[in-house]
Amino acid sequence: MCEWSLAKLGQPLMAVNTNRPEIPKTYNGSPRTRLFALDMMNQYLLTGNGNHGVVYQMVNSSPPVKVMNLKSHTSPVVAVDWSPSSATRVCLTGSSDGKIKILTLLEVENLGKTASS
C-alpha cells in the first residue's frame, strides 16, 4: 500500500507492506465500497475480515499491526470508513445485508482494549 502526493509526482510518501492474508486486496462486489481506510492522521488502518471490522496500527514502513476486532455483523463486512474529524475516533463498518455499525473508539492509547457502539 502506498501513499502518494500530487505535489510530489512519481515518488510515494509512504509505502507499507500489507502482505497479510486478512487485509483484502480485491472485492467482487460494488466498486463504490471501500475495503480499507486510513484515519485522518494515517495512524490506523480499518478493514473488514469476515463479519467484523479490524483496526491495525500503522508502524512506519513495516506491516500494519493488528490492535483490535470490532463488533461483529451477521453478514460479511463490505465497506469501512473513518470520520473525517481528527478530533474523534469514529469509524463505521457496513455489511452485505445493508446494516451499518458506527463505533467510537475510546482512549487512543488503549485502542487495542476498548470499543463502544
Image: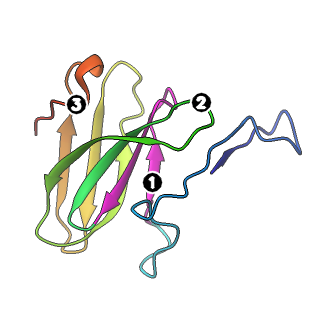
Residue in the picture at 55% in, 58% down: 19
Residue in the picture at 62% in, 51% down: 1
Q: Secondary structure at mark 3?
A: loop
* Magenta stretch bounds: 33-49
Earlier residue among tags 1 and 2 = 1
Q: Dot 2, crowdedness within 10 Å: few (<14), some or many (≥20)? A: few
Q: Dot 3, crowdedness within 10 Å: few (<14), some or many (≥20)? A: some
Quadrant hosting residue 47: bottom left
Earlier residue among tags 2 and 3 = 2
Residue 60 in percent (x, y) is at: 59, 30
Give the residue at mark 2: 60
Q: How far apart are the alpha carbons under marks 1 and 3?
A: 17 Å
Task: Indicate which disc residue 36 carries.
Answer: 1
Q: Is residue 64 left or right of residue 108?
A: right
Q: Residue furthest bottom?
A: 28
- In the picture shown, does residue 14 fall above or below 35? above
Q: Dot 1, crowdedness within 10 Å: few (<14), some or many (≥20)? A: many
Give the residue at mark 3: 105
Kind of residue at disc 3: Leu
Q: Secondary structure at mark 1?
A: strand
- In the picture shown, does residue 75 fall above or below 65? below
Residue in the picture at 15% in, 34% down: 115
Residue 110 in percent (x, y) is at: 23, 22
Frontmost of labels 2 and 3 is 2
